[in-house]
Image: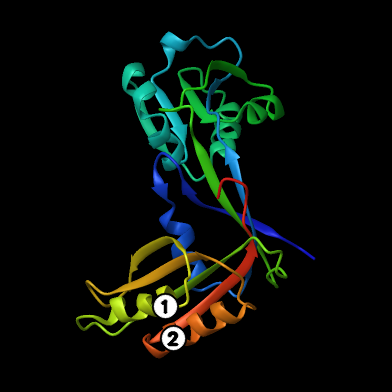
Amino acid sequence: MEYGIAPIENSLEGSINQTYDLLLYSQLKVCHEVIVKITHCLIANCGVRLDSIKAVYSHPQALAQCRDFLDRLNGENIPTYDTAGSVKMIKGKNLTDSAAIASERAAQIYHMEILARGIENNPQNFTRFLVLSKQDSPPTGSDKTSLIFSTKHVPGTLLKALEGLAAQGINLTKIESRPIVGKPWEYNFYLDFEGHRTEGRVQQALENLTQNSIFVNLLGSYPKARGG
């Protein structure tokens, strides 16, 4: 079976909205979650000095997670599509006044020099990743379920939808709202809660939720990561 992995939230900078938006249209299921401690490095071409850095490239999340260090560096922060890709780019262009924020492994792969390690705003920096596949996972006894739903845009509908989970003793671990494109100030809601979709109480909760929603998209049930 083939798998993909996507970051969903960071302990310092919060939700990764692009991933949430892509899940709305994906046909894949969430089959696992992984929590990874993130240590960022400032990486440059060999021989480049820290005091010569005028621009730093990285993914917007990495730039935000290292904001305090970058403020002291006082250079230009330039967002790119990827952390490791930023290292590859400054190597390919042989930039001598620029650096990238990425992992130590990225520096090793591209044979680059690490100018500073552990530059994130807080050492307790973790990113939660979702593992995606064509099927979700069987129950393990310590599971989570993720889904997307929306309600009518009238008073009390969100409360009624969530009450259906509370009535079954479902522990909600996260709720996230994302705008519905073309409907200003209306939202899709993303839920994570404890339990597996095959459990009786979860099935009843999902039935309650469906009765009070316009649509429900079950993203999958999967083993809960340690610390998640």
Cβ–Cβ under 8 Å for marks 2 and 1: yes
Q: Which mark is residue 218?
A: none
Is residue 104 shown above or below 197?
A: above
Q: Position of residue 76 (x, y in %)?
A: 34, 27
Q: Position of residue 167 (x, y in %)?
A: 42, 78
Q: Position of residue 158 (x, y in %)?
A: 30, 77
Left/right of residue 37 with respect to residue 155 in the rendered view: right
Q: Secondary structure at mark 2?
A: helix
Q: Quadrant of residue 51?
A: top left
Give the residue number, with chain letter if any, for mark 1.
167
Residues packed near mark 2 inside 10 Å, few (<14), some (14 to 19) or many (20 plus): some
Q: Residue furthest bottom?
A: 211
Q: Nearer the viewer, residue 136 or 78?
A: 136
Is residue 27 shown above or below 3?
A: below
Mark 2 → mark 1, Cα distance in angstroms: 9 Å
Q: Position of residue 83 (x, y in %)?
A: 54, 37
Q: Nearer the viewer, residue 3 or 200?
A: 200
Residues packed near mark 1 inside 10 Å, few (<14), some (14 to 19) or many (20 plus): few
Quadrant holding the N terminus: bottom right
Left/right of residue 85 with respect to residue 62 in the rendered view: right
Give the residue number, with chain letter if any, for mark 2.
208
Q: Earlier in the sequence, mark 2 or mark 1?
A: 1
Q: Nearer the viewer, residue 169 or 26?
A: 169
